[in-house]
Amino acid sequence: MTVAEIFECIMLICFGFSWPINVVKNYRAKTAKSMSLPFILLILFGYFAGVASKFIKLALEGTPLSYVLIIYFINIASLLANLVVYFINLRRDKLAEKAAVQETAEETSETQDTDAPAD
């Protein structure tokens, strides 16, 4: 493993520790309001580009694949978990919004019933 690969591993490990923490935080929040789909997708794209670079180096230069790929795949898995949590929380947000609209409609209906003059 080269010095460059060691530093790449350190960078990936630092990022890698943050993604599972983020998954748990977002799952516990039960809302997608603090999450950013474009951000998650951009980071995923970056990781896929990193993986692609390793395979391109293998094909063009004969550089053997390194253990760094394992860290890339672990990070990608964590980000995919974040993506799943995003859509779960988005669904929760939509259901909560629908319930709030329905509750408001019911309260409005009850208020109109009590305000109506008795015959």
Image (tube, rainbow, N blue to C red):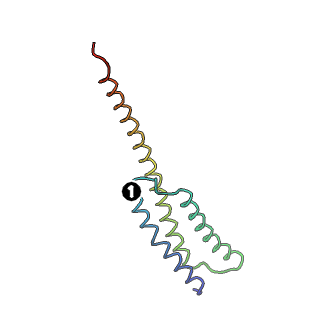
Q: Toward which corner of the image does residue 25 lie, by quadrant?
A: bottom left
Task: Answer above or below: position of 4 versus 118.
Answer: below
Q: Position of residue 7 (x, y in %)?
A: 56, 82
Report the number of discs: 1
Residue 73's x, y, as percent? 52, 69
Q: Nearer the viewer, residue 109 or 21?
A: 109
- Asked if residue 21 is positioned above or below residue 65 in the image, the reply reads above
Q: In the rendered image of this protein, does residue 77 appear above or below residue 108?
A: below
Front one among 61 and 22: 22
Depth check: 35 or 85 in front? 35
- Tell which of 3 and 114 is nearer to you: 114
Q: Position of residue 78 (x, y in %)?
A: 47, 65
Which residue type carries mark 1?
Ala
Most extreme residue toward the top is 119
Q: In which quarter of the image is the C terminus?
A: top left
Q: In the visual, does 14 lie left or right of 109?
A: right
Which image quadrant is residue 116 in? top left
Is 109 on the left or on the right of 63, as rendered? left
Give the residue drawn at x 32%, y 28%. 111
Which residue does the image show at 53% across and 79% down from the upper left?
9
User: Is 56 left, or right, of 111 in this rendering?
Assistant: right
State the residue position of label 1.
Answer: 29
